[in-house]
Image: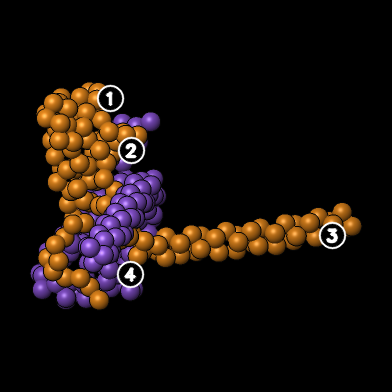
Chain colours: A orange, B purple
């Protein structure tokens, strides 16, 4: 069954779009340590406050952060809901990377077997040569 | 520690950008059942082949799908690597949604306690009133 687009309110698309930027992901990483003001968030990025505010608006619209009500400070904090949606979505594909690693594992095991065979052959040949 | 943008090759951003579209996620859902040709993929979407091809190119650039070498058919298949990166990234934030649910749980438990208290009080009051 395929969910055809625009059937239900699509909350995943704005979440993924918000996460598709390294600065926004770095902002989330900073917020994972606790609430921060916009000024505090702007600090490590050598970025203007308006530029950071723009990123925060994208994160806020996706529900990834919430802002405090204090008009002076309005601290930002991370909200987990949309990240849970991402985790649930990606979980449905787990077998694809698990399978890939299984296949790599099979390949490495096969390689090991071949190497052992070659070594054994070399050893036998060596003994035969020294016997000659 | 915050990874500043553009420090390392950023593979997550194109992955998240590719996933920020419901049609592309639906294509991945279809491919999770097995290889499909572009024509087969286009079928359920009432979409032109060029439109589907455009989506496939975005998915392919992000490494989310691979195309077969057969020039005639070039079947698409899902590749798990970038999805594992997404799962690993989001895993780092698990405590945020686990915590949210813990907090909701605490809140509901507190509500329940309050409701019980109110009911007990009502019962006692009722008894006192019927006693009068």
Name the chain letter of the residue that bears numbered label 4.
B
Camera-near label (1 vs 2) is 2
Cα–Cα gap, marks 4 and 3: 54 Å
Disc 4, SS: loop
Tell me what residue is drawn at x 29 percent, y 36 percent.
Answer: A31
Of labels 3 and 1, earlier in sequence is: 1
Cα–Cα gap, marks 1 and 2: 15 Å
Q: In the rendered view of the protein, which quadrant contains the N terminus of chain A?
A: bottom left
Camera-near label (3 vs 1) is 1
Q: Position of residue B123 (x, y in %)?
A: 28, 63
Disc 1, SS: helix
Cα–Cα gap, marks 3 and 1: 69 Å
The answer to whether the residues at label 3 and label 1 have Cβ atoms under 8 Å apart is no
Q: Nearer the viewer, residue A45 or A59?
A: A59
Q: Position of residue B51 (x, y in %)?
A: 12, 64
Cα–Cα gap, marks 4 and 1: 40 Å
Camera-near label (4 vs 1) is 1
Tell me what residue is drawn at x 28 percent, y 57 percent.
Answer: B121
Residue A48 visible, this angle: yes
Of labels 3 and 2, earlier in sequence is: 2
Disc 2, SS: loop
Q: Residues within 10 Å of mark 4 (few under 14, many from 20)?
A: some
- Give the residue number, with chain letter if any, for mark 2: A32
Per the rendering, the mark at residue B32 is 4
Q: How many marks?
A: 4
Name the chain letter of the residue that bears numbered label 1.
A
Q: Is the residue at mark 3 from the same chain as the one at mark 2?
A: yes
The answer to whether the residues at label 3 and label 2 have Cβ atoms under 8 Å apart is no
Per the rendering, the mark at residue A128 is 3
Tell me what residue is drawn at x 40 percent, y 62 percent.
Answer: A94
Q: Residues within 10 Å of mark 1 (few under 14, many from 20)?
A: few
- Give the residue number, with chain letter if any, for mark 1: A44
């Amino acid at each position: 069954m395929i969910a055809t687009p625009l059937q239900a309110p699509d909350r995943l698309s704005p979440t993924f779009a918000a996460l598709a930027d390294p600065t926004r992901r770095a902002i989330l990483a900073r917020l994972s340590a606790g609430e921060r003001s916009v000024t505090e968030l702007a600090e490590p990025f050598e970025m203007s406050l308006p530029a950071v505010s723009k990123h925060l608006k994208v994160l806020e619209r996706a529900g990834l952060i919430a802002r405090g009500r204090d008009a002076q400070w309005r601290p930002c904090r991370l909200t987990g809901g949309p990240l849970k949606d991402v985790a649930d979505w990606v979980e449905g594909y787990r077998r694809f990377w698990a399978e890939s690693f299984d296949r790599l594992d099979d390949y490495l095991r096969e390689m090991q077997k071949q190497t052992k065979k070659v070594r054994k052959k070399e050893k036998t040949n060596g003994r035969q040569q020294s016997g000659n």
